[in-house]
Image (cartoon, rainbow, N blue to C red):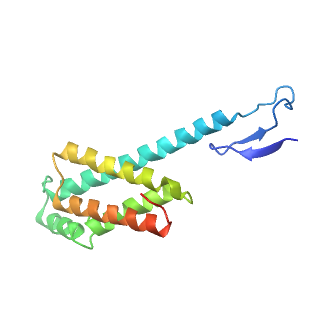
Amino acid sequence: MSQFNIGVTGQPYRSVQAGSGEKGQRIKKSDDVMEAWQKAAEEKFSKLMNVVRELIQQQGGLAEGKLTVHVDVRLELEKDLGDQGYWGAEKTSERILAFAKNLAGDDSSKIELLKNATIMGFEAAEKMLGGLPDVSRRTYELVMQGFKSWAEDMDVTI
């Protein structure tokens, strides 16, 4: 008896018992499914790493004053980099963690993978910037605390 399933790509495929396939019917092997899952996990890992790197680069450029701006704009940037500002450590760490949680969905086994992707994103930004400004180091601390709390809430050891 065959049954329709939804594959990693969201496309339905028919799984059947060995030897029971109809002529021309595509039979999905478990190795193919595992390979697709691995590819999807790698894509999510890469996306998170890139998002973290880009956010930290933007945050770092603003914090280090690498932008030449009008005094009014400079005051707005300083406000945005403040503790409660959009580019401040707290708000940026919230966005990074929200993105990671969205990628993980209901799969708590992805927490460590996403934490590692985040670390790699910070390391890539640090390398590109030649170091991290204080606001980015504080963001990193808050993100790591967030991953720890998330893992504890999900009863996962990371």
Q: Closest to the observer: 79 or 26?
A: 26
Q: Is residue 27 left or right of residue 100?
A: right
Q: Residue 130, relative to residue 146: is it above or below?
A: above
Most distant residue in the bottom direction:
84
**Residue 42 on image: x %, y %:** 48, 41
Q: Residue 88, relative to residue 117: is it above or below?
A: below
Q: Is residue 29 left or right of residue 37?
A: right
Query: Residue visible at 57% across and 60% down?
Result: 106
**Residue 41 on image: x %, y %:** 51, 44
Most distant residue in the front direction:
157
Residue 22 in which image quadrant? top right
Q: Is residue 84 left or right of residue 109?
A: left
Query: Residue visible at 23% across and 59% down?
Result: 136
Q: Total of numbered circles in the picture?
A: 0
Query: Residue visible at 58% across and 42% down?
Result: 37
Q: Closest to the observer: 156 or 125?
A: 156
